[in-house]
Amino acid sequence: MIRHALAEGWLLISQRKGVSVILALALAVPICLAGVALSVNRWIAPMVELSRAEPAVAVLLHPQLTEDQRQQWLEAQSRAHQGWRIEAVPPHELTQRLTHWFPYLTDLLEGEGGAILPPMVEVTSDDPEGVAALLDDPSVIAVGPRSSLHGLLRKTSRQLGWLLGFGSAVLLASAGLLAAVWVHLELFRHGDEITIMRLIGATESAVRGPFLVAVVAPGVLAALLSVTGTVLAVEALSRVVVGLGLPPLPVAPATLILEAAAACLLPLAAAAITLHRHAATDFE
Amino acid sequence: MPNPEPRATGAADELIRLSNLCKDYDHRRVLRGIDLHVDAGEFVFLTGPSGAGKSTLLKLLYAAERPTSGEVWVAGHRVDELPRHRLHELRRRVGVIFQDFKLLKRKTVLDNVTFVLRFHGLPPAEAQRRAYNVLKRLGLHHRHSAYPESLSGGEQQRVAIARALAYQPRLILADEPTGNLDAELASELLSLLCDINYQGATVLVATHDHSLLESIPARTVVLHQGALSYDGSWPP
């Protein structure tokens, strides 16, 4: 039965080689784009994650403050601002946190070797702009970034994540629709043949097998094309973003597996459903 | 040498039984309460004017249609209640010669006949050998590599017959089998069907050609406006 399906399926494909290749390409393009969109979505995931965190603002205190003065200042601020959560950065994390919040100090920090690092606190608040008012306090020498640019970046990355996720879903759905229409037309073209096969005693598996093989083959080709296309496109995008000083885009194996599965299973599912419906309506 | 007459049958086992069979198309009754028994080994003509319901009755026998009411029994199996996934079991016991041939256009003459034998589980070489022999018997072996579209109507008809005979079914249903043949070929075909009948197969031939009925003595069932109006020897 499998030999019959393979032989007859190959016969169907060989009669429409050009169409099979074009349809494989047509199927590969939206799936490949969906794969690229998913890869970009994965790449911006840390930024999206960041946007979910509560907004925090770094505050640099005067380096001349004594330990007692710092403690008094922290207690005074906590009393004055009930909604704030103020946390002193421990000395062993100071260099790393200073570099994170004040990247323009990196050269200075490296030059000084961390000898006169100012104490720093992180203030978590729903109102980051309110924290900026601390600049008027003589104990404070700088307040870290809390500009609308950061918020905008976070918001944009989150929206981009949704957009790419939605785009991937739409592209996969369009690939599925394309496969369904293609299979439907192919089966319509062979409708008489299928009916004859049933009338002369072929089992349903003997009738359906060749058509399933005939749609899986372009699906496999589409899987190879879309996976290759995604890898190449993501590598090209990576080169661009690395040139901008950003981390490279990852090519997740899960994305490639999803693409291959979609390319093979979408036409297969479309064929199975259409053949089932054809069988149901053939002898009413 | 083909046998010129159908086989004489005595009391034998019942192969076809139709009980109070009715068929409607869009609220138009095509068959009205048909009761019919055909014994194994019989040769039966089914005749009547166009639209009398001959083709519909044959379709009900190989389950291409479902009756509106009544029962269809073939070889002890209730055909009208067979689930769709078991229809192939019935169709492998029944050889059908279709009025419009129903040949697979993208297969050669030999492949059309081999194809059906492969469904019956024959290995490829054996299926091809047997298909070639059947074609030879019908004088079509020299066209075995031709495609149906390049054949004349009569040749296509003979391929359809070869396909129906290839797996030696117990029952042959022929729907206007001589419709596309000249008088000489029609006579040859009839002889062939008689020969198959003589070898034990039951043959049911639907035709409106009265000259065919007169050419051999056989049981004749007449349908008129969907009802059975005569059952006996021809002429009435």
Image: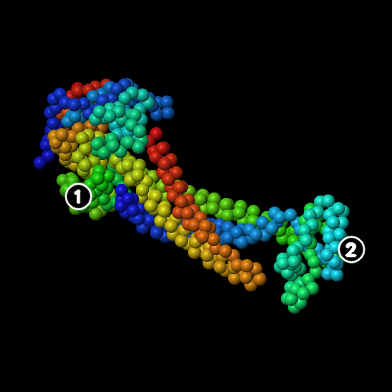
Q: Which residue lies furthest to the left in this view?
A: B1
Left of A51 or right of it: where is B161? left
Give the CA distance from mark 2 to mark 1. 100 Å
Query: Which of label 2 and label 1 is nearer to you?
Result: 2
- Subunit ID for the residue under disc 1: B
* Three-letter code for the amino acid on which mark 1 is drawn: Glu
At a point 76% along the width and 77% down the height, the residue shown is: A112
In this rendering, would A175 be left or right of A278?
right
Most distant residue in the front direction: A68
Asked which colour scheme the image uses, the reply is rainbow
Q: Where is residue B232 in the image (x, y as percent from the top left)?
A: 19, 23
Residue A228 percent across, percent down from the top left: 49, 64
**Residue hosting label 1:** B126
Q: What residue type is labelled 2?
A: Asp
Residue positioned 79% across, 65% down in the render: A120
Label 1 CA crowd tier, 10 Å (few <14, some 14–19, many 20+): some
Contact check, label 2 and label 1, Cβ < 8 Å: no
Q: Are the numbered discs 2 and 1 placed on the same chain, yes or no? A: no
User: Residue at 75% of width from left, 73% of height from top?
Assistant: A114
Residue that label 2 marks: A136
